Amino acid sequence: MDRTQAQALLSEFGTLTGLPDVELDEAGIGTFVVDDNILVSVGFDDLAGRLVLMATLDQCETGPAQMTAMLQANFLWRGAGGASFALTPNGDTAVLLFPVPVDANAIALSVIVQSFIDVIETWQKRLAAIDVGSEPAVVPLASAVWG
C-alpha cells in the first residue's frame, strides 16, 4: 500500500461510516473522533506500507501497577485484542497501537476501528480501577500462555 492508496482507503472508510474524511497530513497522520470522546490517530507507515491506529490513554493514571498490566496485556497480544501498548517517545503517555493489515478494505477497517474502540474503552475502565499505589500483579507464565 502506498500513501495514495492509504488515503483512498480512509476516504472510503469515512463514506462508509459517516465520519468526515480523514486526511493524512504532511507527516502521514490523520485523526478522527469516535463517540464524542475518543480521539483516534491513524498514521501511514511508509516503511511497512500500512496504516496504524493509535490512541493515547492520557486520561488514565499510569503508575507501576498500570504499566505492568499493560505490558502483561502485550504478551501474545491477547489482553489488548491484537493491539499493543507502548509509551510515547518522551515516555510520559501510554498509547495503544494497532497495525491495519495491508489488504484491508473499508469494511474491514470499520470492523477493526470498532474493535480498537472497544479495547480502548475496556482499558480505560481497567486502568481506572487499579489503585495507583498498588503493587503490580504477577501472573504465572502458564496462566498467561494457556489461561
Image (cartoon, grey):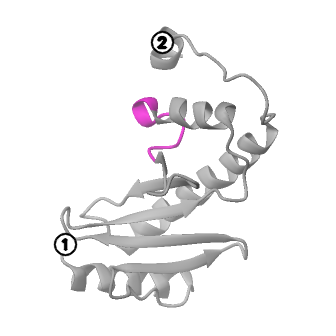
At a point 78% along the width and 44% down the height, the residue shown is 128
At a point 44% along the width and 64% down the height, the residue shown is 53
| Spatial CA span between label 2 and label 1 | 37 Å
Vertical order, 83 against 139 (above or below): below
Q: Earlier in the sequence, mark 2 or mark 1?
A: 1
At a point 52% along the width and 53% down the height, the residue shown is 96
* Left or right: 117 in relation to 4: right
Farthest front residue in view: 90
**Disc 1 target residue:** 1
Q: Tell me, yes or no, whether the two marked residues, 2 and 1, touch with CB atoms within 8 Å.
A: no
Vertical order, 127 against 39 (above or below): above
The x and y percentages for residue 119 are 60, 50
* Left or right: 59 in relation to 105: right
**Disc 2 target residue:** 141
The x and y percentages for residue 106 are 39, 74
Disc ID at residue 94? none
Q: The magenta stretch spans which residues?
A: 75-83
Is 98 magenta? The answer is: no
